[in-house]
Amino acid sequence: MNAVNAPLLRTGLSDQIREFIVDGITSGRWEPGERIVERRIATELGVSQGPVREALRQLETLRLIESTPNRGARVREFTEEDLGEIFPVRAGLEQTAAELAVPRMAGHVERLERQSDNLAEATRTGDAVAQIRHAIDFHREIVTASGNRLLIAVWESLRIEIWTTLSLRLHKTDLHEKSAEHARITEAFREQDPAAARMLHDHVMHYAP
């Protein structure tokens, strides 16, 4: 989101501001413990402070920021315990999604292959931002293919982008190995192997502490 080149629409304003802040946390613009100044964001985006305040409340509910009296909002200091809670939930959701998606995809895995290939190329060139994007898009393809709208909504609400980025920062994860795992999972989907669901579960849990 760009405050100059892409003015915010009046509809869904707090949602757009929330995504702006999420992008800032993911990219490292705001580091853990750093204060997020409501007034500055409002000025930068050319909006009033009301929708910024609402966006910050939403992010506090998602446990991405914390607010304290007289000190305002700060990015949470994410811990191993946080990661230890989020990834088992994500792994369970994705295992269920894969169980539903394998027969629905019926061996047609072109979209998975494309994301897997994109991840492999980003890994080869060392583009960390693209690696994370393609890795998450790979998982999103499987979740979407499940066809279960509630599951999809819950998965999206976990803010996978942020937690994946934080895990990679904390653990210095070997993305070359992650890329290879994606290729193996893709092959399992191509063969409609029921083991694909468990493979995906274990793959996600490798991000956990």
Image: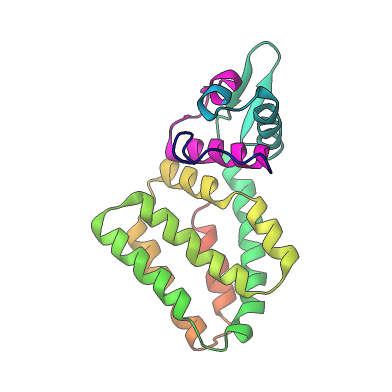
User: How far across and down, in percent of the image, does residue 39 sit?
Assistant: 59, 19
Q: Residue at x 45, y 34 (%)?
A: 4
- Considering depth in this image, is 114 or 32 the residue closer to the camera? 114
* Number of marks in picture: 0
Q: Residue at x 52, y 50 (%)?
A: 161
Residue 178 colored in magenta in the image: no
Front in this rendered view, residue 10 or 114: 10
Quadrant position of residue 105: bottom right
Whether residue 153 is situated above or below residue 101 in the rendered picture:
above
Q: For the point 68% across and 27% down, which residue is it?
A: 53
Residue 185: in sight, yes or no?
no
Tell me which segment is drawn in magenta.
12-41
Location of residue 165 with respect to 206 vertically, above or below? above
Decide if residue 190 is in sight here.
yes
Picture quadrant of residue 78: top right
Spot the residue most to the right. Answer: 150
Q: Position of residue 9 (x, y in %)?
A: 61, 41
Q: Is residue 56 above or below residue 186?
A: above
Q: Residue at x 53, y 65 (%)?
A: 139
Q: Position of residue 170 (x, y in %)?
A: 44, 41
Side of 204 relative to 133 (left or right): right
Q: Position of residue 74 (x, y in %)?
A: 58, 24
- Magenta region, main secondary structure: helix
Establish if 103 lies above or below 206.
below
